[in-house]
Amino acid sequence: QVHVVESGGGLVQPGGSLRLSCAASGFIFSMYGMSWYRQAPGKERELVADISSSGGSTNYADSVKGRFTISRDNAKNTVYLQMNSLKPEDTAVYYCNARYVAGSGKLYEYWGQGTQVTVSS
């Protein structure tokens, strides 16, 4: 049974930091690319950051470059999102995504339930 569970969200003041975690089980974590998405009220879900299966490659949305860092620990089946210098516009529900495309072309994709991040004074 697949589980993807985010944690670490909460209320933080502008300029503060949070570290999100995403713990996964039920699939071979080290084979999956992992991503963080977010969705603010009234807006579409957007990609925040992603990391390759080995952790050797990362990508970030322009809006978070230099402030957020994605990392993973394949021994712990966990991916992290370190968020620094938070802004009110970072307020959203943050979702963890696991994605793997098999050689056959079949897509395997799993989502977590999301964790709320609120940046406000």
Image (cartoon, rainbow, N blue to C red):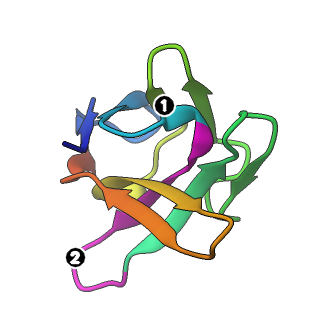
Of 79 and 108, the residue lying toward us? 108
Residue 91 occupies quadrant: bottom left
**Residue 115 appears in the figure:** yes
Residue for point 30% across, 37% down: 26
The N terminus appears in which quarter of the rendering? top left
The label nearer to you, 1 versus 2, is 1
Residue type at numbered disc 2: Pro
Of 84 and 36, the residue lying toward us? 36
The C terminus appears in which quarter of the rendering? top left
Task: Single out the residue that lies furthest toward the top.
Answer: 75
Which residue was labeled with disc 1? Answer: 80
Which residue was labeled with disc 2? Answer: 41
32 to 26, vertically: above or below: below
From the top left corner, tell me how far across and down residue 101 is, in percent.
Answer: 60, 65
Q: Which residues are magenta?
A: 31-44
Residue for point 80% across, 44% down: 57
From the viewer's perspective, is 88 left or right of 73?
Answer: left
From the top left corner, tell me how far across and down residue 9 is, in percent.
Answer: 25, 37
From the top left corner, tell me how far across and down residue 29 is, in percent.
Answer: 49, 35
Q: Secondary structure at mark 2?
A: loop
Residue type at numbered disc 1: Tyr
Residue 95 occupies quadrant: bottom left
Label 1 crowd (10 A; few <14 / some 14-19 / many >=20): many
Residue for point 64% across, 41% down: 67
